[in-house]
Image: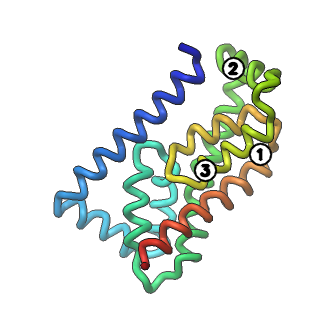
Amino acid sequence: MHIKNVRTLVSVSIFVTGLIITVIAIQFPAVRQYIGRIDQSGLMGAFFAGVLYALAFTSSMATVVFLNMPASISSLLVALIGGLGAAVYDVTVFVILRTQSRQGLLEALRSRLSDSKKLPSWLLTLSGLAILASPLPDELASGLLSFTKISAKKFIIISFLANVIGIYIISSVGRL
């Protein structure tokens, strides 16, 4: 099995495991109470939930938090603060992967992706954007985008905007 397939399988497995654990966990009153505390902690809770939104294992839990944020805080403000938290995590992963990918196995994968005629850079970028905006594992998107020629500054902006859009949609749906 190719390295890319193994990484994708691991990321999806972590996400699905987190989703299953979230579905089971929210059945317990103590977990619902904990989520309620994050919800009620306002903008600091939105930032913390944003960081959780970017992590593969906890993205589904963060989605529950964003769905239940108090109506007294605007969805746009929740999305902006949550997007900032998610972008902080994403940039950290992006920088680590970009730095580490210059060595060994990751460099071979990077060369293969960038030299491949099958996967144009714009497709990797578009895929990364879609993953960043969704509750899917941001590590996968950060990894894809770290293999492109995108600058760290552009990545910060892209990560922030994509996460803001995704969180805004989730937060808005929670208010319906």
Pick the residue in front: 108 or 45. Answer: 108
Q: Residue 48 location in percent, x, y?
A: 46, 60
Secondary structure of residue under mark 3: helix
Secondary structure of residue under mark 1: helix
Q: Residue 124 location in percent, x, y?
A: 72, 38
Q: Which residue type carries mark 3?
A: Leu
Q: Which mark is residue 31?
A: none
Q: Which residue appears at 58% of the width and 16% of the height? A: 2
Q: CA distance from mark 1 to mark 3?
A: 15 Å
Q: Toward which corner of the image does residue 21 lie, by quadrant? A: top left
Q: Residues within 10 Å of mark 2 (few under 14, many from 20)?
A: some
Q: Residue 100 location in percent, x, y?
A: 67, 26
Secondary structure of residue under mark 2: helix
Outermost residue, left direction?
29
Disc 1: which residue: 152
Pick the residue in front: 127 or 62. Answer: 127
Disc 2: which residue: 109
